[in-house]
Amino acid sequence: MKQFKTITIIAISAILIALVYSQLESKPKENKKMEKMPVEKTDAEWKKELTPEQYRVLREKGTERPGTGEYNLHFADGMYKCAGCGSNLFGSDTKFESHCGWPSFSEIKDKSKVKEIKDTSHGMIRTEVVCANCGGHLGHVFDDGPTSTGLRYCINSVSLDFAPDTNKSKNK
Ligand SMILES: [Zn+2]
């Protein structure tokens, strides 16, 4: 009987320890204090405005499956905007085919439009690109670009909206 009691106590302790650890593990992710952004919305508001896939990528730093994005092989003249807030991000003249499966750009329209953050997730050291206006996750920037800038902004298509340039076709 004594032995049974001891086993019960050990089992309960183990469960309690496991519970405490699971709580601790989920905490560090939220420790990172988000910087104040010009466009701030609650998670509920973002969920209402964005599609589930946009929410997963923009707000939860997800990545769309390569080769599936609407703008991956899209080469019309115009402006690529943040799908979260409409900020002008990339001009179509900087887009190139990188064969990596995501829309790729050699240059940002205006450096102040994005924030670059060191990202060490998934065992890699990368530079994350987020919208400076709403904090939405856009993708990553790499320094192996084929153009003169040497940069390759690898951006999730779902994080972008496209506004066609109607003047450009008129001027031609
Ligand atoms: Zn934005």
Image: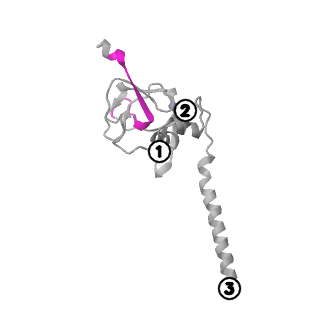
Q: Quadrant of residue 16?
A: bottom right
Q: Is mark 3 within 8 Å of ligand 1?
A: no
- Mark 2: few, some, or many residues within 10 Å (few <14, many ≥20)? many
The reply to whether the C-beta atoms of the residues labelled 2 and 1 are less than 8 Å apart is: no
Q: Is residue 96 magenta?
A: no
**Relative image position of residue 57 (x, y in whole percent):** 47, 41
Q: Is mark 2 within 8 Å of ligand 1?
A: yes
**Relative image position of residue 141 (x, y in whole percent):** 43, 37
**Relative image position of residue 78 (x, y in whole percent):** 37, 23
Query: Could you say whether the residue bearing mark 1 is in a helix, strand or loop?
Result: loop
Query: Taking 59 as reference, is 170 above or below it?
Result: above
Q: Nearer the viewer, residue 96 or 50?
A: 50
Q: Residue furthest left?
A: 172
Q: CA distance from mark 3 to mark 2?
A: 60 Å
Task: Say what amino acid the circle numbered 2 marks.
Answer: Cys
Task: Name the disc covering residue 134, or none.
Answer: 2
- Residue at numbered disc 3: 3
x 62%, y 61%: residue? 21
Q: CA distance from mark 1 to mark 3?
A: 50 Å
- Mark 3: few, some, or many residues within 10 Å (few <14, many ≥20)? few
Query: Taking 170 as reference, is 144 above or below it?
Result: below
- Residue at numbered disc 1: 62
Task: Say what amino acid the circle numbered 3 marks.
Answer: Gln
Q: Nearer the viewer, residue 33 or 85?
A: 85
- Identify the image's colour scheme: rainbow, by chain, secondary structure or one colour: one colour
Q: Nearer the viewer, residue 30 or 108?
A: 30
Q: Is residue 148 magenta?
A: yes
Magenta part of the chain: 146-168
